[in-house]
Image: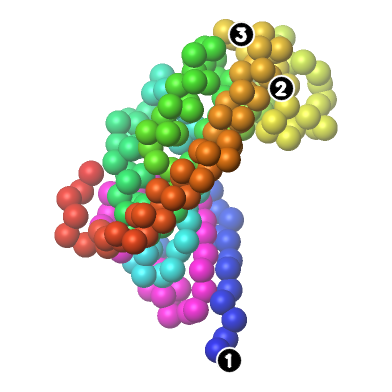
Amino acid sequence: MGPSLYIIELADDNTFVDKKWSKELLRLFSGYRMKWFTETDISVAYDDQLLELLAQSNCSQVLIGFETALPAGLKGLDKANWKYRQFDSYLKAIDKIQSAGISVNGCFILGFDTDTPETFAETAGFIQESRLSEVQVTMLTPFPNTALYHQLKKEHRLLADPFWNKCTLFDATFRPKNFSVADFEVYFQDLMRSVYSEERVAQRRATFKQLLRNKILPNGNEHI
């Protein structure tokens, strides 16, 4: 009997910031009989060598925070507006990573001040169009003592303070800008039912299985 197959997680918000170091790590990982997953951003799709090494290292999944399906919601999320400037590359990046045999778990947050009632349906549509194999959908949550918390507290929009028992990512903790708290909860629940319906989950799995059958290493592919 051969050695056991291990599955590990690298719990880093963005494992591949240092591309040179990342490639050395992936070459090391490729020598072990294991599967693994981690968090990153879509820049892994911009580096063909990194993506090929990622596939060869038996990485099964990367979790990427896309945050929102609307570009306006990305403005100001980071100092250089990096994510906002990448938005037009989202779909092509997802396809390229998954075509290399690596599942993309896309994360979306609802409740930004730029969100409207229409945003929830638009998010469901974007997820469908993207062909993501896995999805995480959560509510914007102003964890105590963060910048967002202090902003909403100053604007008198927190529903309670403190509210650690509500920091689940699935409970409303503040008053949204463009809809009521009650509507926020209803819209979010409707989105969850849509995204995680048996039909949609099965469709995402089937799509990724097809990609695995047609797996193409990124070497030679055009850069995004």
Tell me whether circle 2 and circle 1 mark residues in contact (CB < 8 Å): no
Toward which corner of the image does residue 93 lie, by quadrant? top left
Marks 1 and 3, how far apart at CA: 59 Å
Task: Single out the mark in the foreground, 1 or 3.
Answer: 1
Whichever of callouts 2 and 1 sits on the residue coming sooner in the sequence is: 1
User: Judging from the image, what secondary structure is the residue with disc 2 in?
Assistant: loop
Please say whether residue 43 is one of the residues in the magenta stretch: yes
222 vs 127, nearest the viewer? 127
- Where residue 166 appears, x then y in whole percent? 78, 29
Tell me whether circle 1 and circle 3 mark residues in contact (CB < 8 Å): no
- Where residue 95 appears, x then y in whole percent? 32, 46
Is the N terminus in the top left, top right, bottom left or bottom right quadrant? bottom right
Instruction: Indicate the amino acid at tag 2.
Output: Ala
Mark linked to residue 179 = 3
The residue shown at (40%, 48%) is 207
Instruction: Indicate the amino acid at tag 3.
Output: Phe
User: Judging from the image, what secondary structure is the residue with disc 3 in?
Assistant: loop
Residue that protrudes farthest toward the front in the picture = 199
Whichever of callouts 3 and 2 sits on the residue coming sooner in the sequence is: 2
Mark linked to residue 103 = none
Marks 2 and 1, how far apart at CA: 51 Å
The residue shown at (58%, 26%) is 191
The residue shown at (44%, 68%) is 58
- Where residue 202 appears, x then y in whole percent? 51, 45
Residue 51 visible in rendering: no
Residue of label 1: 1
Instruction: Indicate the amino acid at tag 1.
Output: Met
